[in-house]
Amino acid sequence: MLLGTFFLLGLSAVNAQGTVTGKVTDAKGDPLPAISVKVKGVTTGTTTNADGFFTINIKQPEVALEFSGADITTITQRAKPGEMITVTLEQKTRNLNEVVVTAVGIKRSEKSLGYALSKVDPKALVQKSEPDVLKTLSGKVAGVDIRSSNGTPGAATRIQIRGNSSFFGETQPLIIVDGTPFSNDEVATSDRNSGGGAYSSGISNLDPNDIASMTVLKGSAASALYGSRASNGVVVITTKSGNPGRSKKGMEVTYATSAGIENINNLPVYQNDYGTGKQFTYANANGSWGPKFGTIDSIPTWPAYLAAFPNLFGDSVAYRAVPGNVKSLFKTGSVFENSLSFSGGNEKTSMAATVSLLNHNGYVPNSSFDRANISFGGATKLDNGLNIRGNYSYAKTKQVGGIFGEQQSPGASSSFARTLFLGRNWNFSLPFEDALGHPVSTIPAAYD
């Protein structure tokens, strides 16, 4: 009986030993030579031959075989003695941080370029909601100056690289989107000095959620790629829809949402000792050069309010400072953005699509900017080696408000020319419309 037990144990030990053979291929089915094959936890092993085959001896009833190689994602697969297995390995995602897109989609090593450049992480562009791509660059690239013409939603944004290069002509860099020059000109239809609006520019139509990469080429040397128009530098943008790529995960669906609030950055420090008038004498006029508060108790009721609301006002109102009157003209603005992206494909064909909605209500009352974007693209490689690629993008924007200028006094170029030095005793918490919806103010001839 004891002898039989030893015999069985010895037979089990023999059965536990043996060889595992197999073949290692890539995702296309092509053999992978020189792939390391070893039992996990053991330093010795073998490698695949020129045809991707291997044979390895094992001493256990089941082992974990580890497959690894250069630019190959290491995997582990379990095997038993006598098995013939097939293993498929994937190439690692190569780090392209040092590769940049230059002219016409050409990729070059960053170290080989003879001019300065900066790359922007696309994820940084959507970390906070902004109405256009250029505003998202603010503070992210050294030597790049981003300026908006005003704080009104949708207002044009100006970009300069390393300051003004000329006193004449255009000093903004050339913007290239998927190999095509993109206009950032401001489109104005009227004179702001006499009632124009806060006009937008072309770049505000571009969807930040669809950007795959952004590179800023600095200096006039970049003009060697794009000609004289690039003498002020170049901003190269590639989009997901314009350059679709196959995802390692198959079909991917990404939903992104963001929300932000905004307030006016600062206001002048106002005095609250004197009210409206001149030479320390009261008058209902712009400018606070009237009597000192406390020296008189009341002033005549403003004629427009007395006429519009005879039951709310008497012949006089208190003469006192309203410290927050200018600040009360502004409100808390909001920015909401939602985006849905799709990407996927196989070895030969890939596609990408992005749909986004932006809603921006400004801190200046009655001002807003809405944008809807849809973009999609695809690429395929034919059997004869020909690559076909195409993409489509559509943007619809609506901009409201931001009226500037004064028809009767073209010398003042902005509504803030009146807003920022309004009388210190004017109370803007009062009604601003009469029963018919007509504007009412303390001095209609000066402001609405």
Image (cartoon, grey):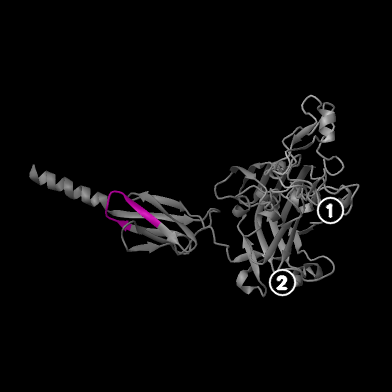
State whether residue 247 is above or below residue 429.
below
Give me the residue at 34% from left, 50% from top.
82
Q: Quadrant of the N terminus?
A: top left
Q: Is residue 25 visible?
A: yes
State whether residue 329 is above or below residue 161.
above
Looking at the rendering, the stretch of residues picked out in magenta corresponds to 57-66
Label the magenta part by its dominant secondary structure.
strand
- What is the residue that sits farthest to the top in this orientation? 311
Q: Which residue is mark 1?
A: 413
Amino acid type for the residue under numbered disc 2: Gly
- What is the residue that sits farthest to the right in this orientation? 408
x then y, percent, for residue 101:
67, 63
Q: Quadrant of the C terminus?
A: top right
Q: Viewer-proximal residue, 246 or 243?
A: 243
60 magenta-colored: yes
In the rendered image, which quarter is residue 435 located in? top right
Kind of element beneath mark 2: loop
Q: Nearer the viewer, mark 1 or mark 2?
A: 1
Q: Viewer-proximal residue, 296 or 358?
A: 296
In the rendered image, which quarter is residue 367 located in? top right
| Number of the label disc, if any, that sits on residue 219 | 2
Q: Earlier in the sequence, mark 1 or mark 2?
A: 2
Kind of element beneath mark 1: loop
Give me the residue at 81% from left, 27% from top.
309
x then y, percent, for residue 213:
65, 57
| Number of the label disc, if any, that sits on residue 129 | none
